[in-house]
Image (cartoon, grey):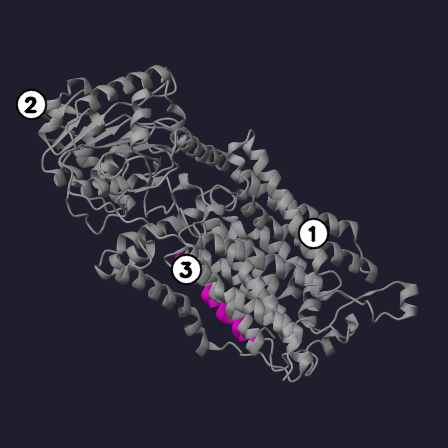
Amino acid sequence: MRLRPGVVRSGLLAGLLAALPAIGFAAVPASPAAAQAAPARHVVIVGLSGLRWSDVSPSATPALWRLAGQGSVGSLVDYAVLPLTCPADGWLTLNAGARAQARHTDAGCGTFPAVRPQGAGAAVPALPALIRYNQRFHNDPDWGLLGRAAGCATAVGPGAALALASPSGSVADYLPSAGDLSAAVLSRCPLTVVDLGNPGYSERASALAAADTELQRLVAELPSGTTLLITAPGATTTPPHLQVTVVDGPGYRAGLLESSSTRQPGLVVLTDLTPTVLGWLGQPVPSGLIGAQLTRGARASGSQSLPATVRALAGRDAAEQVWRSTHNAFFWAYALADAAVLAAIALACWGSAPERRQRRARWWRRAAVFAVSVPAGTFLANLVPWWRLAHPAAWLYGVAAVLAAVIALAALLVTRRRDPLAPFGLVCLLTVAVLGIDVMTGSRLQLETPFGLSVLEAGRFYGIGNEALGIYGISALSGAAWLGLVALRRSARSGPASPRPALAAVAAVAVFAVFASGWPGFGGKVGGTLAMVPCFALLLMAVAGIRLNWRRVLPVAASGLALFAVFALISYFTGITGKSDMGTFAGSALHGHAGSLLLRKIGSNLGSLSVSMFSPLIPIVVLVTGLMLWRPAWFGLKTMPLAYAAEPLLRPILAVLWLMPVLGWFADDSGVIVPAAALPLALPLAVGLLAAAAYRYRSSQVSKQEGTQGARAVPAIADGRRPVPAHDLAAEGDRGGEHPRDRWRDPGR
């Protein structure tokens, strides 16, 4: 049997997409193993709240610079409960090994809890009340863990007292000031915690110089073999920044700190510090702790190693500030630009004449292709190190706009005079390929991009971000649907229609998209797995011509949950995926401790409705768009019925594109943020698909007489072989034999 070239191309593309997970898996470097060393005789933690890498230099902080040169360095994500993590929050989190907070709001820090010296020790009277206050956050802190694990521990300064206090607020060994430290005091206990204060904005340079001098004196008194951790628990200044973490000791020489919590070189989180100290002391780490132990990764060697590393760490913080200051404005600009352009085209081409409809559909299609190309452009912009340049925000959005334009023009030119749906399919496949491969290789393209990950938000550090979830799922479903339509048409033209090539193409995209997003070793995205798997199942049923009934609803609905359970159990029992949220949840569920986590996720989901004054409008928009797709006649929509008749599969395709962000809304803890972030992509995509399907244009079939009168817009059947007039669509739209999937019946009718 001779295969047609188109079938061969479709098969090769499907095979490539199916093979990409294995390629990405091979490309992911193995995570560094935790340092296997004998327990440290002495561990010293030095805290200087608010310390950033932009503060560190050979002239301003010579002692700290020297320690950074001989030890391992990284940026600390100081996120406890609120975006503003105050010094007391940081010290409390160290105390309990879980996110904790003193009483304050995001507007500013409150009064630091009082510490009262009592003999050789001290008391923190407010701690029992703070413990009760933190119960509302459902973070399961283990109060007094740090001090209890050390057995003997010395607290120096008020923050250190907070870190080492027992649940009753008592501190066994306390010194009010670092000036009271001596070699004898540092040698007395396995653990010493020192609070060097909090340099604010005023007199910051002099405060840093004084703290550096104190640090130099402390280092000179350290016992041999001491492991020293310098960190920055919390800050009183806003906006939040990435802060300094340095480890100097056995196993951490001249390196870059890493953590399986973030999977990002040089990036650690506040909750990593307590389990790391427990490991240094040779104590078991409780299974309920969410943090991971810090390990050493390699950094560039040579005389410029440290300056280059510090510039890179400071550059990451600069990128975070760009994200924080422009993120909301970008979303508004993107959404309003979509609406303005589509409305302007409608007004400029107003009218019901065929020529007006044709022109309006053509320009809607072009504008929609550009709108759909924007996400891919923003992610690919990270290929340029814009955060190192002057005016980084201008570079980020300028490069993103240029790349989006190039992608859109390429898609339109490559598919010119071919399938009018092809530009959307190609752009969506490019988007899901870029995101999927990026997730498999470390999620570098998502960091600080508009739709990507903000590490300061501490929501995710790898995988598909909450705001990219809807975009990723919609792109995957759209690309898979287009490949399925292409395969169906080619199958119908080459002989008896068979859905097998189309099913293979859709399944290949589904496997790639779900595996990249959901596999715990890559993205580990719970919400993505729960939302995408049922939608792909429905899409496969539509392509196969299988009607959805009540007997099939339950298996489809449970498919995402079943795959999530498989991924979670593999992660927990085998460890081949490394530490992941899925594995942690599986362990908590098996040991009966998942209740607090679920309550926290549910609270976060419900809280998304109050993120802004516009958040309550999102459910209304979602409901209205769903009704438009289901009953377009209720809204007087003319293009949608024409498109459904011309391409019957478009109805179930648009249905799953609507359903995916809705399921993501309920399955992900970010709630309505999932459909809200997807709307600026989904609406122009739907408009473009409907316009392209409803009004296809005669080319070679236009007669000479029609050519002199001007080509008129006519809807066409799916294979494009026999266009039909608009007024005959109801009679001829999906008549047997005219659609390549003549066994398929539209379940919406």
Tag of residue 225:
none
Evaluate whether residue 408 shows in this view.
yes
The percent coordinates of residue 552 (x first, y second) are: 45, 77
Mark 1: amino acid:
Leu
Mark 2: amino acid:
Gly
Magenta residues span 525-543
Who's the residue at 21% across and 19% down the image?
217
Query: Considering depth in this image, is 362 or 411 the residue closer to the camera?
Result: 411
Quickly name the residue at label 1: 409
The percent coordinates of residue 577 (x first, y second) are: 33, 58
Above or below residue 683? Residue 487 is: below
Query: Considering depth in this image, is 700 or 186 the residue closer to the camera?
Result: 186
Alpha-carbon span between mark 2 and mark 3: 55 Å
Tag of residue 119:
2
Alpha-carbon span between mark 3 and mark 1: 32 Å
Mark 3: amino acid:
Gly
Q: Is residue 277 magenta?
A: no
Spot the residue most to the front.
302
Who's the residue at 60% across and 43% down the image?
400
Q: Nearer the viewer, mark 3 or mark 1?
A: 1
Mark 2 crowd level (few <14, some 14–19, many ≥20, 10 Å Cα): few
Q: Nearer the viewer, mark 2 or mark 3?
A: 3
Image quarter in which the C terminus is found = bottom right
